[in-house]
Image (tube, grey):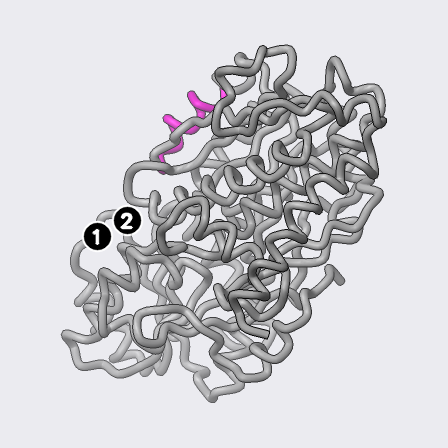
């Protein structure tokens, strides 16, 4: 069967999934109340809508992965609304641009609470998220983080009382995953390049812990602020220390500065790291210097099975553009569906949905959600607010300007969507 036919069949399956969600949870009388799709929310009375907050960097230096996250949410909301929405109420997205700035993010978070959204999907930058967690926790409003990976985010509050959930792979599993890979290659003299944001700070600690677990220490550690233009001095020091691999913990543009600096020095060592090495600001910014970079991934944009083929096809139909950061789009998409599944556990929620009831719904999702990144069978619990585990990671590689599988074994394993362990 051709990929085109697979995609068409799979898209039909996914559109039916939204309808089956309603069939499984909602009374038949509510199914007849479905109204216009999410693309025209203004025509729908407010009483017939359900407001979901979305916050992330949709402009600025982190927009390369913020916008794909938003698009994944929009795609899922469109499909859910086409299937009848929640109890006949259309999902309406209330969108706030945090610009990758913690202060702007805090203001946007406070506005979402004031504007009465039911729950919020958001944050791509760990430092931005960290400054706003208290807003959602104090308001008892569930926050689902689809992109930011800093380990401390879901550890700030005790599990049973926490309203902070996450559907991205925290750095505490990404760092050891990458460390194990580089050690298998014999690259055991690690130079760590980490920015001074909350993301870089937490990531540095996770890499150091992963190395320590293998009886190693970094041979060199470099710190730098966002916006740095030249890291020649730090790269020269790392080379002098005998490093045979550079482990970078920063975002796209600064990763490109590292790669271009290595090229200028003619220092041919691999650059590895977490998922920002898959961002276009790195790949397009570093160009040929980005080739061969290795990074942890939860989703690679290849139609390896029906679910993923349908997602890629639906995205192309809706946005008619390349998927800049497939992981961000896929995780935003799955997060929106998981939230909707949780909402349907709130049986008395036709008129009002209280934060504690939605929190409980997330912790007790009854049905398996067959998602793009994973197969979600009880992704959250009272004590565990992270939906992904290390077995759901694969190693990605920049090849000819795109991210593909670094290991043939991962490509084969990716035919089957993994479950949390």
Percent across and percent down for residue 343 are 74, 30
Residue pictured at 28% horizontal, 49% vertical:
225
Task: State the quadrant of the C terminus.
Answer: bottom right
> Residue 180, position in %: x, y?
56, 77
Q: Label 1, on which residue? A: 228
Query: Where residue 191 sits in the image (x, y, percent)?
Result: 37, 72
Q: Is residue 76 above or below residue 14?
A: above
Q: Label 1 to label 2, Cα distance in Å?
A: 6 Å
Residue at the location (63% across, 64% down)?
Answer: 306
- Position of residue 30 relative to residue 202, above or below, is above
* Residue 271 in magenta stretch: no
x, y percentage for residue 239?
26, 78
Q: Quadrant of residue 8?
A: bottom right
In this rendering, does residue 208 appear at all?
Answer: no
> Is disc 2 surrounded by few (<14), some (14 to 19) or many (20+) residues within 10 Å?
few
Q: Are marks 1 and 2 in contact (CB under 8 Å)?
A: yes
Whether residue 336 is visible here, answered yes or no, is yes
Q: Quadrant of the N terminus?
A: bottom right
Please give the range of residues in magenta. 100-110
Magenta run includes residue 107: yes
**Residue 217 higher or lower than 365, as above or below:** below
Q: Would residue 38 be found to the left or right of residue 241 on screen?
A: right
């Amino acid at each position: 069967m051709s990929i085109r036919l697979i995609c068409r069949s799979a898209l039909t399956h996914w559109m039916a999934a939204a309808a089956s969600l309603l069939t499984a949870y909602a009374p038949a009388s509510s199914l007849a109340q479905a109204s216009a799709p999410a693309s025209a929310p203004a025509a729908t009375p407010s009483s017939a809508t359900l407001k979901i907050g979305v916050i992330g960097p949709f402009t600025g230096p982190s927009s390369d992965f913020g916008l794909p996250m938003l698009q994944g949410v929009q795609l899922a909301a469109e499909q859910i609304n086409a299937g009848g929405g929640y109890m006949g109420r259309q999902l309406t997205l209330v969108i706030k641009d945090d610009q990758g700035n913690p202060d702007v993010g805090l203001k946007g978070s406070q506005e979402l609470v004031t504007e009465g959204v039911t729950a919020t999907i958001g944050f791509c930058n760990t430092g931005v998220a960290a400054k706003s967690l208290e807003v959602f926790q104090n308001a008892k409003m569930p926050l689902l983080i689809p992109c930011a990976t800093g380990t401390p985010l879901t550890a700030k509050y005790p599990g049973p009382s926490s309203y902070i959930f996450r559907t991205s792979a925290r750095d505490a599993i990404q760092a050891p995953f990458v460390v194990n890979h580089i050690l298998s290659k014999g690259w055991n003299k690690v130079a760590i390049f980490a920015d001074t944001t909350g993301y870089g700070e937490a990531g540095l600690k996770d890499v150091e812990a992963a190395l320590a677990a293998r009886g190693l220490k970094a041979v060199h550690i470099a710190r730098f602020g966002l916006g740095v233009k030249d890291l020649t001095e730090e790269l020269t020091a790392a080379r002098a220390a005998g490093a045979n691999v550079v482990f970078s913990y920063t975002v796209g543009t600064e990763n490109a500065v590292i790669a271009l600096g290595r090229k200028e020095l003619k220092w041919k060592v691999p650059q590895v790291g977490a998922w920002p090495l898959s961002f276009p600001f790195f790949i397009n910014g570093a160009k040929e210097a980005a080739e061969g970079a290795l990074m942890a991934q939860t989703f690679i944009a290849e139609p390896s099975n029906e679910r993923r083929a349908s997602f890629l096809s639906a995205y192309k139909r809706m946005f008619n553009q390349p998927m800049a950061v497939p992981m961000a789009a896929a995780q935003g998409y799955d997060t929106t569906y998981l939230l909707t599944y949780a909402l349907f556990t709130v049986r008395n929620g036709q008129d009002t949905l209280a934060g504690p009831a939605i929190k409980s719904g997330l912790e007790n999702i009854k049905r398996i959600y067959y998602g793009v990144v994973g197969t979600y069978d009880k992704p959250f619990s009272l004590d565990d607010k992270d939906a992904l585990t290390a077995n759901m990671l694969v190693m990605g590689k920049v090849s000819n300007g795109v991210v593909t599988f670094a290991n043939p074994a991962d490509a084969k394993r990716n035919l089957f969507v993994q479950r949390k362990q």
